[in-house]
Image (cartoon, grey):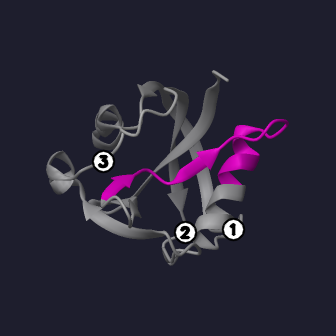
Amino acid sequence: MNSIELIVRLVIKREDKVLLCLNKAAGSYFLPGGHVEFGDTFERTIYKETAEELGWTQADVRSFRFKGYLENFYSYKNGAEPHAELNMIFDVDIAPTTQANSQESHIGFEWINISDIPNTKILPETIVPFILQ
């Protein structure tokens, strides 16, 4: 079945670094976030995904602002059906003492220097300009 996945992606910066999620199996990075479930708002999804992935509470997420969107189409190398996603990208401000500790074993979180972003394997590659803005 062809469908479009709706995803929120979060640009979280602290000083000269940005928080990226590491796919441990693939060795690539992506912005934190996740799928918007039917009936959920973007706001609810932001709070839900930061709680599930990082263990954050609503108090940890101080504010967020819509930054833009990115359409992404891709195919897996194993020949599976092509995928389409619409990424809704948000700048997120967090409390200064908030820690980034993964709550899921298959992913990790790292603060990456913004100056290193152009040389970091981030997927989809077309999302990099949103990080650098």
Q: Is residue 92 above or below residue 74?
A: below
Residue 72 lies in what quarter of the image? top left
Do the CB atoms of the residues marked 1 and 2 lie less than 8 Å apart?
Answer: yes
In depth, the one of 70 and 5 nearer the eye is 5
Residue furthest front as drawn = 79
Residue type pointed to by label 1:
Ala
- Determine which quarter of the picture holds residue 126: top left
Q: Position of residue 106 (x, y in %)?
A: 49, 69
Q: Nearer the viewer, mark 3 or mark 1?
A: 3
Residue 24 sits inside the magenta stretch: no
> How dense is the environment of label 3, judged by Cα within 10 Å: few (below 14), some, or many (20 and up)?
some
- Where is mark 1, residue-wise? 59
Give, as a three-letter code, the residue at label 3.
Ile
| Quarter occupied by residue 70 | top left
Query: Mark 3 sits on what residue?
Result: 122
**Residue type at mark 2?**
Ala
Residue segment shown in magenta: 28-47
Relative depth, front residue between 120 and 77: 77
Q: Position of residue 123 (x, y in %)?
A: 35, 43
Task: From the image, tell me which residue sits under label 2.
Answer: 95
Above or below: residue 42 compared with residue 120: above
For the N terminus, the image quarter is top right
In the image, what residue occupies the spot 35% across and 36% down?
127
Does 85 sit left or right of 27 as displayed? right
Q: Which mark is residue 24?
A: none
Which SS class for mark 1? loop
Q: Nearer the viewer, mark 3 or mark 2?
A: 3
Q: Earlier in the sequence, mark 3 or mark 1?
A: 1
